Amino acid sequence: MKVACVLFDMDGVVVDSMSLHASAWREVLAQYGIIVSNRDIYRREGMPGRDSVIDICHEKGLDPPDEQTFGRLLKKKNAIFERGHVRLYPHVKSIISLFRRQGIPMALVTGSPKRAVRHVIPKEMLRLFDVLVTADDVTKGKPDPEPYTTAIRSIMPMKERAGGFNQDNGVALCVENSPLGILSAKRAGAVCYAIATTLPARLLEGADRVFADHKSLLVFLQGELIQ
């Protein structure tokens, strides 16, 4: 498989942040009387925050908070999240460097707002991505394909200047960790690799390949890209 561009999800793929997101949501939603588990949050990763909360409430037979109340909850959630420490996953830098050495353009595609990206991604790491697509840049979040199609359209002119982008000379490869992210990637026409960082591999079966961790993905990519 020839890779024309790589599109990385952020939370749960580049940074180990999902447990912090989940604990922050659990705390603020409990104040509203909504009791959730980490799994409730992980299953909806990639969805816009309000859509996730509405979906959780519907599943539990509860009335979702109105827009004004949700705004207050989101502000509290962000404050809790930003007090925590988030780290890059081991081997992420090596994976990104591998694609960079091959001259393959990369995008960071996240359901989080730009504010969260600035909080968790070091500036020197962010500069390695050619394109950034956040919740602020789209009208529909994952599982809609818009986040990934937006990134692909942004990268295509770069590939055209470098010799062209089409299905004959390369595919868009997405790296995800959630079912909704995988669905978004596949709907965008991309190949999707998933890493089982937050959910078991059986819940990621929609991906073209599923890896247990970043190290196993790195080893696979080294065999595929370095000839």
Image (tube, rainbow, N blue to C red):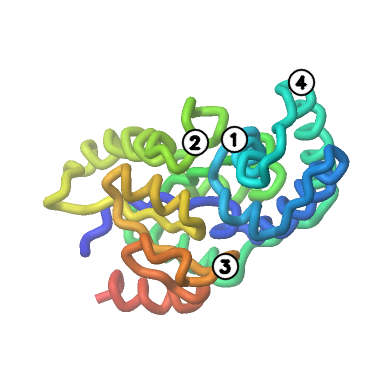
Q: CA distance from mark 2 to mark 3?
A: 21 Å
Secondary structure beneath label 4: helix
Residue located farthest toward the right when viewing the structure as drawn: 31
The reply to whether the C-beta atoms of the residues labelled 1 and 4 are less than 8 Å apart is no
**Residue carrying label 3:** 197
**Residue carrying label 4:** 68
Tag 1: amino acid:
Asp
**Residue carrying label 2:** 141
Tag 3: amino acid:
Thr
Tag 4: amino acid:
Gln
Residue drawn at 45 percent across, 71 percent down? 202
The reply to whether the C-beta atoms of the residues labelled 4 and 3 are less than 8 Å apart is no
Q: Earlier in the sequence, mark 4 or mark 2?
A: 4
Q: Earlier in the sequence, mark 1 or mark 3?
A: 1
Judged by depth in the image, the label closer to the viewer, 1 or 3, is 1
**Residue carrying label 1:** 51
Question: Which quarter of the rendered picture does the C terminus lie within?
Answer: bottom left
Q: In front here: 169 or 36?
A: 36
Q: Earlier in the sequence, mark 2 or mark 1?
A: 1
Tag 2: amino acid:
Gly
Q: Which mark is residue 176?
A: none
Q: CA distance from mark 1 to mark 4?
A: 14 Å
Could you tell whether 190 is left or right of 53 in the image? left
Label 4 packing within 10 angstroms: few (<14), some (14-19), many (20+): few
Q: CA distance from mark 4 to mark 2?
A: 21 Å
Residue located farthest toward the front when viewing the structure as drawn: 61
Judged by depth in the image, the label closer to the viewer, 4 or 2, is 4
